[in-house]
Amino acid sequence: MVEEGVKPNGLTIVSALSACAKSGALEAGRKIRDIITNNGIRLNIAVANALVDMYAKCGYIESASLVFSGLKEKDIRTWSIMIWGWAIHGHVDKALRCFEQMRLAGIKPDGVSFLAVLTGCSHAGRMEFVPAKITGELVIFYFEFGVTVTAIK
């Protein structure tokens, strides 16, 4: 597309980065990042999320963190991607810190962000490190969605 002189738009970039993330194609993802930079494509929230996700899923969590840290705008998806990234790569403390930073930024946790923290702690065999604050919020989250049996357990 680019070689033919056609400038990609945000949707094209998001689709291409998502494909790279799913297939673990880091080098292709880096080329897309270069296309973003060289063509002045605006790094909106969708493109930023796809870029952070691609780096995290390809195992380059520090690159994901650099992009994440440079973002002025972050939504719940952005935060959840980064929390998952830290968690699946064995950085439970960083996942918990990121979760707390999200809350301090005024972003309310959702099921995905809770699951990311719990999965990271579980895989690391560190469920005792799940702060009581998170456990309490999870119970409230379950009640809000009418899952009272799970919340009571």
Image (cartoon, rainbow, N blue to C red):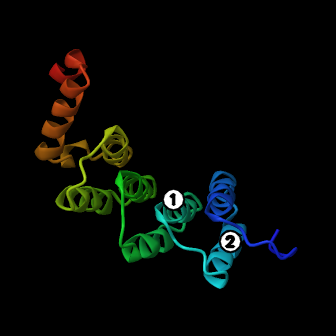
The residue positioned 52% from the left and 71% from the top of the image is 43
Left or right, 60 with reference to 143: right
Left or right, 7 with reference to 148: right
The N terminus: image quadrant: bottom right
The C terminus: image quadrant: top left
User: Within 10 angstroms of label 2, few (less than 14), some, or many (20 or more) residues?
Assistant: some
Q: CA distance from mark 2 to mark 1?
A: 14 Å
Quick one: 152 or 51, which is closer to the camera?
51
Q: Which residue is mark 2?
A: 32
**Label 1 element class:** helix
Q: Please state the horizontal and vertical placement of residue 123, each as a whole percent of the image.
A: 39, 45
Q: Which residue is mark 1?
A: 46
Sequence-wise, which precedes: disc 2 or disc 1?
Answer: 2
User: Within 10 angstroms of label 1, few (less than 14), some, or many (20 or more) residues?
Assistant: some
The residue positioned 41% from the left and 58% from the top of the image is 78
Q: Please state the horizontal and vertical placement of residue 37, each as a whole percent of the image.
A: 61, 81
The residue positioned 54% from the left and 68% from the top of the image is 60
Outermost bottom residue: 38
Q: Please state the horizontal and vertical placement of residue 79, each as a whole percent of the image.
A: 36, 57
Quick one: 128 or 153, which is closer to the camera?
153
Q: Mark 2 against mark 1, which lies toward the viewer?
A: 1
Q: Amino acid at mark 1?
A: Ala
Q: How many marks?
A: 2
Left or right, 112 with reference to 132: right
Residue 32, placed above or below residue 89: below
Q: Which mark is residue 11?
A: none
